[in-house]
Amino acid sequence: MPMNRAHRKLCSSEGWAQTTKDRILPWALEHVELGADVLEIGPGYGANLRVLVDRVDPTSPPPSSTPTPSGCSSRSGGERATVLHADGAELPVPDRAFDSVVCFTMLHHVPTVAHQDRIFAEAFRVLRPGGVFAGSDSQPSFRFRVLHFRDTMNTLDPASLPTRLERAGFTDPVVDLHPESGGLRFRARKV
Protein backbone atom coordinates (compact mmCIF):
# COMPACT_ATOMS: atom_id res chain seq x y z
CA MET A 1 0.00 0.00 0.00
CA PRO A 2 1.41 3.44 -0.90
CA MET A 3 0.27 5.01 2.42
CA ASN A 4 1.59 4.32 5.91
CA ARG A 5 -0.75 3.67 8.85
CA ALA A 6 -0.71 7.27 10.19
CA HIS A 7 -1.43 8.61 6.73
CA ARG A 8 -4.34 6.18 6.22
CA LYS A 9 -5.76 7.18 9.61
CA LEU A 10 -5.56 10.88 8.70
CA CYS A 11 -7.14 10.42 5.27
CA SER A 12 -10.04 8.39 6.66
CA SER A 13 -10.80 10.91 9.43
CA GLU A 14 -13.72 13.32 9.69
CA GLY A 15 -11.18 16.12 10.11
CA TRP A 16 -9.74 15.34 6.67
CA ALA A 17 -13.25 15.17 5.20
CA GLN A 18 -13.94 18.64 6.62
CA THR A 19 -10.64 20.00 5.27
CA THR A 20 -11.53 18.60 1.86
CA LYS A 21 -14.95 20.21 1.98
CA ASP A 22 -13.88 23.58 3.35
CA ARG A 23 -10.49 24.17 1.75
CA ILE A 24 -9.15 21.70 -0.80
CA LEU A 25 -12.02 21.25 -3.25
CA PRO A 26 -13.29 24.85 -3.21
CA TRP A 27 -9.81 26.06 -4.20
CA ALA A 28 -9.05 23.22 -6.62
CA LEU A 29 -12.37 23.59 -8.44
CA GLU A 30 -12.66 27.37 -8.38
CA HIS A 31 -14.19 28.44 -11.73
CA VAL A 32 -14.36 24.81 -12.96
CA GLU A 33 -17.60 23.64 -14.57
CA LEU A 34 -17.81 19.91 -13.89
CA GLY A 35 -20.79 19.08 -16.08
CA ALA A 36 -23.12 16.15 -15.40
CA ASP A 37 -20.74 13.21 -15.80
CA VAL A 38 -17.70 13.39 -13.51
CA LEU A 39 -14.94 10.86 -12.99
CA GLU A 40 -12.75 11.11 -9.91
CA ILE A 41 -9.47 9.22 -10.11
CA GLY A 42 -8.13 8.01 -6.77
CA PRO A 43 -10.88 9.04 -4.34
CA GLY A 44 -9.25 7.31 -1.39
CA TYR A 45 -11.71 7.04 1.50
CA GLY A 46 -14.41 9.08 -0.25
CA ALA A 47 -14.07 12.52 1.38
CA ASN A 48 -13.87 14.24 -2.02
CA LEU A 49 -16.77 12.28 -3.44
CA ARG A 50 -19.08 13.51 -0.68
CA VAL A 51 -18.39 17.08 -1.78
CA LEU A 52 -18.53 16.33 -5.52
CA VAL A 53 -22.02 14.88 -5.17
CA ASP A 54 -23.32 18.32 -4.26
CA ARG A 55 -21.49 20.03 -7.15
CA VAL A 56 -22.94 17.79 -9.86
CA ASP A 57 -26.41 18.31 -11.29
CA PRO A 58 -28.65 16.00 -9.18
CA THR A 59 -30.96 15.31 -12.13
CA SER A 60 -28.14 13.82 -14.17
CA PRO A 61 -26.65 10.35 -13.87
CA PRO A 62 -24.10 9.84 -11.05
CA PRO A 63 -20.29 10.71 -11.05
CA SER A 64 -17.61 8.02 -10.58
CA SER A 65 -15.12 7.11 -7.71
CA THR A 66 -12.63 4.43 -6.39
CA PRO A 67 -10.95 3.87 -3.01
CA THR A 68 -7.41 3.23 -4.25
CA PRO A 69 -4.75 5.90 -4.70
CA SER A 70 -4.52 5.23 -8.43
CA GLY A 71 -8.07 3.98 -8.75
CA CYS A 72 -10.94 5.59 -10.51
CA SER A 73 -14.37 6.64 -9.35
CA SER A 74 -17.59 7.56 -11.11
CA ARG A 75 -20.55 9.80 -10.15
CA SER A 76 -21.63 11.04 -6.70
CA GLY A 77 -22.80 9.49 -3.40
CA GLY A 78 -25.44 6.84 -2.89
CA GLU A 79 -27.41 6.16 -6.04
CA ARG A 80 -25.70 9.13 -7.61
CA ALA A 81 -22.27 7.43 -7.55
CA THR A 82 -20.70 4.37 -9.02
CA VAL A 83 -17.44 3.14 -7.50
CA LEU A 84 -15.03 1.32 -9.78
CA HIS A 85 -11.93 -0.43 -8.44
CA ALA A 86 -9.28 0.03 -11.09
CA ASP A 87 -5.90 1.49 -11.88
CA GLY A 88 -6.24 5.13 -12.95
CA ALA A 89 -3.77 4.37 -15.76
CA GLU A 90 -6.07 1.66 -17.19
CA LEU A 91 -9.62 2.88 -16.74
CA PRO A 92 -12.39 0.36 -17.49
CA VAL A 93 -14.60 3.01 -19.11
CA PRO A 94 -15.25 3.91 -22.75
CA ASP A 95 -13.63 6.77 -24.63
CA ARG A 96 -15.25 10.22 -24.27
CA ALA A 97 -17.55 9.11 -21.41
CA PHE A 98 -17.15 12.09 -19.02
CA ASP A 99 -17.61 15.85 -18.98
CA SER A 100 -14.82 16.22 -16.44
CA VAL A 101 -12.12 14.17 -14.77
CA VAL A 102 -10.74 15.21 -11.37
CA CYS A 103 -8.18 13.99 -8.86
CA PHE A 104 -7.21 15.46 -5.51
CA THR A 105 -4.15 14.92 -3.30
CA MET A 106 -3.41 11.50 -4.77
CA LEU A 107 -0.95 11.89 -7.61
CA HIS A 108 1.99 12.06 -5.18
CA HIS A 109 1.11 8.44 -4.24
CA VAL A 110 1.69 7.26 -7.80
CA PRO A 111 5.20 5.78 -7.67
CA THR A 112 6.63 6.97 -11.00
CA VAL A 113 6.36 9.91 -13.37
CA ALA A 114 5.63 7.44 -16.19
CA HIS A 115 2.63 6.03 -14.27
CA GLN A 116 1.38 9.56 -13.55
CA ASP A 117 1.68 10.33 -17.27
CA ARG A 118 -0.39 7.23 -18.10
CA ILE A 119 -3.07 8.53 -15.71
CA PHE A 120 -3.03 11.87 -17.55
CA ALA A 121 -3.39 10.03 -20.89
CA GLU A 122 -6.33 8.01 -19.56
CA ALA A 123 -8.00 11.17 -18.22
CA PHE A 124 -7.67 12.62 -21.72
CA ARG A 125 -9.05 9.47 -23.35
CA VAL A 126 -12.21 9.31 -21.22
CA LEU A 127 -13.01 13.04 -21.49
CA ARG A 128 -15.49 14.33 -24.02
CA PRO A 129 -14.33 17.14 -26.30
CA GLY A 130 -14.60 20.40 -24.37
CA GLY A 131 -14.13 18.54 -21.07
CA VAL A 132 -11.84 19.61 -18.26
CA PHE A 133 -9.23 17.71 -16.26
CA ALA A 134 -8.72 19.40 -12.89
CA GLY A 135 -7.28 18.64 -9.52
CA SER A 136 -4.85 19.40 -6.77
CA ASP A 137 -1.94 17.87 -4.95
CA SER A 138 0.47 18.61 -2.16
CA GLN A 139 3.96 20.01 -2.44
CA PRO A 140 6.92 19.00 -0.26
CA SER A 141 7.35 20.52 3.19
CA PHE A 142 8.82 19.23 6.44
CA ARG A 143 5.40 18.18 7.79
CA PHE A 144 4.49 16.57 4.47
CA ARG A 145 7.74 14.55 4.45
CA VAL A 146 7.17 13.36 8.04
CA LEU A 147 3.63 12.24 7.17
CA HIS A 148 5.04 10.30 4.22
CA PHE A 149 7.71 8.40 6.18
CA ARG A 150 7.83 4.91 4.63
CA ASP A 151 5.15 6.04 2.20
CA THR A 152 5.08 6.55 -1.54
CA MET A 153 5.84 10.22 -2.20
CA ASN A 154 6.36 11.37 -5.78
CA THR A 155 5.26 15.01 -5.87
CA LEU A 156 4.42 16.90 -9.05
CA ASP A 157 6.86 19.49 -10.32
CA PRO A 158 4.79 22.63 -10.99
CA ALA A 159 7.24 23.78 -13.68
CA SER A 160 7.04 20.60 -15.79
CA LEU A 161 3.37 19.74 -15.20
CA PRO A 162 1.96 21.92 -18.03
CA THR A 163 4.26 20.24 -20.57
CA ARG A 164 3.31 16.79 -19.27
CA LEU A 165 -0.40 17.61 -19.60
CA GLU A 166 0.14 18.89 -23.15
CA ARG A 167 2.00 15.66 -24.04
CA ALA A 168 -1.11 13.78 -22.90
CA GLY A 169 -3.14 15.82 -25.41
CA PHE A 170 -4.56 18.59 -23.23
CA THR A 171 -4.62 22.25 -24.20
CA ASP A 172 -4.37 25.41 -22.11
CA PRO A 173 -2.91 23.78 -18.97
CA VAL A 174 -2.82 26.06 -15.93
CA VAL A 175 -0.90 25.26 -12.74
CA ASP A 176 -1.14 27.45 -9.62
CA LEU A 177 0.39 27.22 -6.17
CA HIS A 178 -1.73 28.09 -3.14
CA PRO A 179 -0.29 31.22 -1.51
CA GLU A 180 -0.62 29.87 2.05
CA SER A 181 -0.49 26.07 1.94
CA GLY A 182 1.84 25.78 -1.03
CA GLY A 183 -0.48 23.15 -2.52
CA LEU A 184 -0.75 22.84 -6.27
CA ARG A 185 -3.84 22.92 -8.46
CA PHE A 186 -4.11 22.27 -12.17
CA ARG A 187 -6.64 22.32 -14.95
CA ALA A 188 -6.49 21.60 -18.67
CA ARG A 189 -8.97 21.08 -21.50
CA LYS A 190 -9.63 18.53 -24.17
CA VAL A 191 -10.48 20.31 -27.41
Image: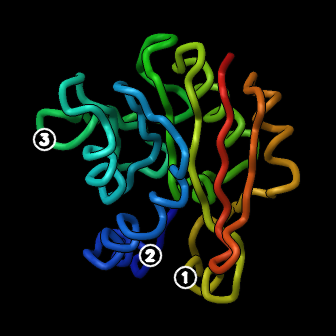
**Residue 47 image offset from top left, x and y in percent:** 31, 59
Instruction: Give the label, 1 or 3, closer to the camera.
Output: 3
* Quarter-of-image position of residue 162: top right
> On the image, numbered disc 2 is attached to which residue?
7
Left/right placement of residue 50 relative to residue 181 reads left
Q: Earlier in the sequence, mark 2 or mark 1?
A: 2
> On the image, numbered disc 3 is attached to which residue?
78
Secondary element at image label 3: helix
Residue type, label 1: Leu
Q: Earlier in the sequence, mark 2 or mark 3?
A: 2
Mark 2, Cα crowd under 10 Å, few <14 / some 14-19 / many 20+, is: some
> On the image, numbered disc 1 is attached to which residue?
147
**Residue 120 image offset from top left, x and y in percent:** 65, 34
The residue lying furthest to the front in this view is 31
Q: CA distance from mark 1 to mark 3?
A: 31 Å
* Quarter-of-image position of residue 191: top right
Left/right placement of residue 75 relative to residue 119 reads left
Residue type, label 3: Gly
Question: By what rule are the colours in the image chosen?
Answer: rainbow
Residue at 45% x, 47% y is: 42
**Could you say which is closer to the camera, residue 98 or residue 153?**
98
Q: CA distance from mark 2 to mark 3?
A: 26 Å
Residue type, label 2: His
Residue at 42% x, 40% y is: 40
Q: Do the residues bearing badges 2 and 1 touch, measured as CB atoms within 8 Å?
A: yes
